[in-house]
Image: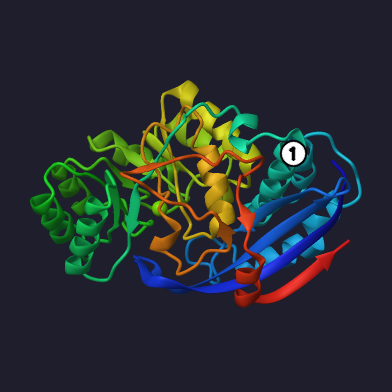
Amino acid sequence: MNIIQIDLHVIEMELVAPFVTSLGSVSRRKGILVEAHDQSGLTGYGEAVAFSTPWYTEETVDTCFHMLKDILAPLLLKTAFSHPEEAAKRMSAVRKNPMAKAALDMAVWDLYAKKKGVPLAQVIGGTRKEVLAGIAVGAATTEEILAQIKQAQQDGYKRVKVKIGPENDLERIQAIRETYPDMAILADANSSYSSNEEKLDALDQFDLQMIEQPLHQDDLVQHAALQKKLKTPICLDESITSFHAAWSAIQLGSCQAINIKIGRVGGVTEALRIHDLCVKEGIQVWCGGMLEFGVSRAHNIALATLKGFSIPGDISSSARYWKQDITTPEVKVNQGIVQPFQEAGIGVEIDWERVEEVRIHHEVLK
Ligand SMILES: [Mg+2]
């Protein structure tokens, strides 16, 4: 591969409905679409999934733009390499900034699969013919959440993830459990609890599929102590920023599940390593979502064809979030199932008319 030009498109779109978590509410979403143009004329696509403000991790759209333009793109431009792992290795000289790295790493993997003329899922060893999709519900009130779960169930989703925090958790989970006794429910706390809160023990009675990231992202030791006390599996999200973080968490017994997000862990290359580690160590994995656009969504679907992804991820229909996505065809979930794309690479085309409607900045790097 010989990348001769990288394009960065900063886009901004309004969500169909605001997404509320314990750390903030998102109603407009910015992101960066990355194009990597190869000498051969092929183009790979990636997406920087950081939010506009650092409420989820420390990265933002602006920090990603700076890292991509000034630091990372120059490492890959015009110096040939033969495999995406080589590109990832070059970028590993830069500390942290996983979402910026992931945007380029995704584009390189897409390009690599397109050069081979096969779907990305096949290149990375994916074997699942169907990808399991769940839904993440983020709303301000319990009534709104119940209404959204009702809709999700009618649409055939078999797992819902709800956002909780110490101020609303018990009444919220109890209300959902009473209405939906058999539904797989995952409760995501986005680090909103402290380690000595008894409320976490109380959540153990509701037969939750998992509790996601109850404590601070740096608290692997406290998560290990909590996991010893709870029968409900703990799933780590924000804590897992790399293969090394995943390895440390597993060694300490901090979790029984890991939510793999390509952006948060630094790219497809690192996501594959974490997946393989989890399979080897008997840790459940599923694919997390970032309220992303169609490019990252297509990468998620390819990743979730790997055998370890045995439980539904946050892979929802594009229409749940966007009036019109930037890719075609859009992602469609049918009865909790997504069919992987069959075309080469990530299998979707960019809808350039739509990109132009929502683009706020375009930069060409050579
Ligand atoms: Mg989460």
Which image quarter is the C terminus in?
bottom right
The answer to which image quadrant residue 123 occupies is top right
Identified at 78% across, 42% down, the residue is 87
Query: Secondary structure beneath disc 1?
Result: helix
Expressed as whole percent of the image width and height from the top left, the position of residue 321 reads: 42, 64
Q: How is the image coloured?
A: rainbow
141, above or below 199, in the image: below
Say left or right for 274 vs 157.
right
Observer-nearest residue: 274 or 15?
15
Residue projecting furthest to the left: 178
Q: Is residue 62 visible to the viewer in this orientation of the structure?
A: no
Observer-nearest residue: 22 or 103?
103
The answer to which image quadrant residue 50 occupies is bottom right
Residue kind at label 1, given as amino acid type: Tyr
34, above or below 91, in the image: below
Expressed as whole percent of the image width and height from the top left, the position of residue 69 reads: 78, 64
Identified at 54% across, 54% down, the residue is 329
259, above or below 13, in the image: above
Q: Which residue is mark 1?
A: 112
Identified at 57% across, 38% down, the residue is 342
